Image: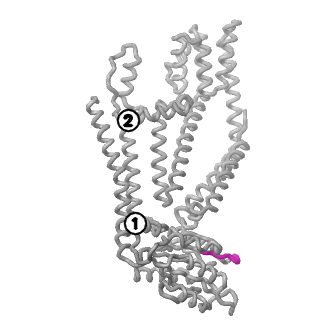
Amino acid sequence: MTGREAFRRGQAAATLAVLSLLALPAAAAVAQSAPTSQSTARGSPLVIVLLDSHQSWPGKGIPEKRKVATLRYVSALPADVRVGLITFDANWQLLLSPTADRSRLAQVLRSAQGIAGNSTGIYAAITGAESLLRRLGAASGRLVILSNAEDVISRPSFTPAVPIDIIPWRYDADDNLVELQALAAASRGRVAPPPHAPSLARVFPHAAAPTAAPSRSAAAPARLGTAPSWSLIGGLACVFLALLLIAMWVLRPLTRGDPRRLAGQIDRYGPRRAPGQPEAEGKAARTARAWASSLLQSTNTERGLAERLDWAGITRSPAEWVLLTGCVCTALAAALTVLTGTALFGILAGVLVGWLGMRLVLNIRIGRRRAAFREQLPDVLQLIAGSLQSGFSLPQALDTVVREDTQPAAGEFSRALAEARIGVGLEDALDGIAGRLDSTDLRWTVMAIRIQREVGGNLAEVLRNTVATMRERAYLHRHVRALSAEGRISAYILIALPLLLGAWLFVTDRAYLVPLYTTVFGLIMLLGAAVLFVVGVVWMRAAIKVEV
């Protein structure tokens, strides 16, 4: 690729990135322009109070605490907010159409009565209140429910059309507060205990003059808690997808399978070094790599990450791995934001899961490579011993292993021979292999080679004895793993069960889990569960791990 083509690719990527970023405010404007233009044409805000009037004991009437909480909430509302009153038990009825006359509302509230002994008419009352709001029209409309949800059966499929604020009570086991919290979460409403009922009124702006048209800044709080705009969510999803595609397109020349890149490396470091040529990657890719490299250098983590990538046999540079991790985190954050509808939770969870996932992938690659080397080492040493007995020197025997091309052993011993050719001691180079692959057996072998070189002896016989010992230890290790298989499977099931159950509930009954990540108490429970989960994983791993 010529320099002009690389510049054009970088310019096109930058243009596409700018257009994608400009799509975000455009989507937000489209999602919010229609409600804003409609709200200016409608009247003042409306609130419908849904008061639970069921009687636990005949003749007791509506509990006085609910009436007091209703009056406290209504008195905290701005004067231009019209308030209506609906009571419900097994059925529902409209006692007062929305009005700004607070004294009339108080009079109607004092005379309200209840008959039935449960609150099962709550869904019909919500539907009736939503119909009333649609008929009257307002700059904003909300429902406020004061109830303990006596004998209410949860309906996960019930989706409110307007924000619902909840003032809950709990007296006994048949009070379904979980459903009340799910209604608030599904409608982007809020939950407040009875003493804090006036705090729910803060969602409405306190206008200086009731007759004045609400300004843009005053209308913004009124839209708090409204249902999410699918246009805005779609715009966000498109932006994240566009940025992910840009990152993948920019990083495409950085893949390890690019033959032009491999040929360039051979030309630069091989015996016939060619003159410098422009790299195949574009300007945007070079800028991203430089930014990631400077970030790693400033945090002093580049060397450690490079060593771990080397241990895993990954040919990417640390900067490329950081950029790939960033793309994964971005994609997961976008997906979780769209699925949960909560930007804060989606972004935090996406970044955390993406980073942990990439770290786990790296650890798995390191573990597999080291395990493969441990499996190959006895055969490799057997081959070296046979070559030594045939009259080869130790470097020649190691070269025989390299020609067998059994990875990762061939690659590592080839590296050791290359280091020995430029002046590094052969034993030191083999110690480097043992350190990278965490091989205790190879350390013992190197120790035996050092002793043999100092005091003399038959190195082939020493290696054969070492191989016999390794194979006995490998047999014992496999025998122990077979005996502990039941415990390991039980640990895997216990670890996976809560994760799979949580994912299943999130897909099939999301309203049941909504309070877990939308309320402060739920987040505390979620954090505690995560800590206990990690402790359990560490404990079970220690219980099933047997050293041989």
- Would residue 208 be visible to someone looking at this image? yes
User: Which of the 4 image quarters holds residue 430?
Assistant: top right
- Residue 346: % across, % down: 51, 54
Residue named by callout 2: 285
User: Which of the 4 image quarters holds residue 366?
Assistant: top right
Numbered disc 1: secondary structure: helix
Which callout, 2 or 1, points at the residue further toward the start of the chain? 1
User: Which residue is at a point 49% across and 67% down the rendered structure image?
Assistant: 225
Query: Relative to the observer, which residue lies in front, 342 or 467?
Result: 342
- Residue 34: % across, % down: 35, 68
Numbered disc 2: secondary structure: helix
Q: Which residues are magenta?
A: 167-173
Callout 1: few (<14), some (14-19), or many (20+) C-alpha neighbours within 10 Å? few
User: Which residue is at a point 40% across and 46% down the rendered structure image?
Assistant: 244
- Would residue 152 be visible to someone looking at this image? no
Relative to 502, 132 lies left or right: left
**Numbered tag placed on residue 216 in the rendering:** 1
- Residue 68: % across, % down: 63, 82
Is 419 a magenta residue? no
**In this rendering, which labeled residue sits more in front, label 2 or label 1?**
1
Query: Relative to the observer, which residue lies in front, 262 or 177?
Result: 177
Does 355 sit above or below residue 75? above
Query: Relative to the observer, which residue lies in front, 504 or 222?
Result: 222
User: Which of the 4 image quarters holds residue 383?
Assistant: top right
Q: Residue furthest left?
A: 4
Does 522 sit above or below residue 412? below
Callout 2 amino acid = Ala
